[in-house]
Amino acid sequence: MSTPLPRVEQATVAVAGDPPSKFSVRRIYCVGRNYAAHAAEMGHDAREAPFFFMKPADAVLPDGAVMPYPSATKDLHHELELVVAIGKRGRNIPVDKALDHVFGYAVGLDMTRRDLQAEAKNKGRPWDMAKGFDCSAPCAAIHTVDAVGHIASGEIELKVNGKVRQHSDINMLIWSVAETINQLSSLVELFPGDLIYTGTPEGVGPVVTGDVLEGRVEGLGSLTITIG
């Protein structure tokens, strides 16, 4: 059956390896305030039940890309995160089975129009346009579990123009990867192609045109993005 419009190409993220391959992105889920120190700097208690928001699949941006400074904001913030790529379908996944559903891990950025987010919070409105805008989910190549194992600890660090802005350890996650999958799969069924951005450590802050962001997670390499 023909369609009246051109087919839209599915968003993908590179998969590290030889030969290289691609991971087709279905949905992007993000966990809010999942490091105690970041929760505190945002004015919230250190531990609360996890909550989730989403970004469109085509918000992904590859390593080395230029991210256009988005419209309608004067306060674009960086949030470096460990990204979990789901490779197995599941709903109501038990914690002790959750890691069986992980295909791999990557370094990602949850870019945020902070001024729009603050305005939405003050008015009791959704955050969608503060979080889910074009190019707002940069993601480096995914490293498979077979290659790197499961990432439960290790440095997570972001530099802006060579200066450290964020630095922590994955073991400081309030809700572990397995617990996050358990909680999220109680709300929606997870499928291969889903990405979970697991939350950011403290030190979030603004970036401007020309800034170079270099994020890394120990064992997963790095992600470099330039604000254009």
Image: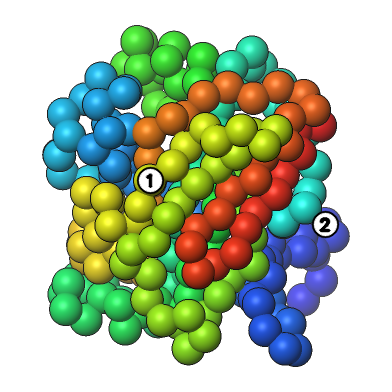
Left/right placement of residue 58 relative to residue 50 reads: right
Dot 2: element: loop
**Relative depth, front residue between 160 and 129:** 160
- Residue at image position (30%, 38%) is 33
Q: Position of residue 170 (x, y in %)?
A: 35, 56
In this view, 86 is above or below 28: below
Residue located beneath label 2 in the image: 5
Q: Is residue 155 above or below residue 53?
A: below
Where's residue 202, x and y in %?
38, 33
Write down the quadrant of residue 152 in the picture.
bottom left
Instruction: Please give the name of the residue rendered at 32% of the width and 33% of the height, measured from the top-left corner.
Output: 38
- Above-or-below relation of 222 to 138: below
Asked if residue 67 shows in the view, the reply is no
Residue 218 point in image, percent of width and height:
48, 63
Decide which of tag 2 and tag 1 comes sooner along the chain.
2
Amino acid at pointer 2: Leu
Q: Nearer the viewer, residue 160 or 185?
A: 160
Q: Residue at x 25, y 19 (%)?
A: 43
Which residue does the numbered mark 1 point to in the structure image? 168
Q: Residue at x 77, y 24 (%)?
A: 209
- Three-letter amino acid code of the residue under disc 1: Ser
Q: Secondary structure at mark 1?
A: strand
Judge left or right: residue 6 versus residue 92: right
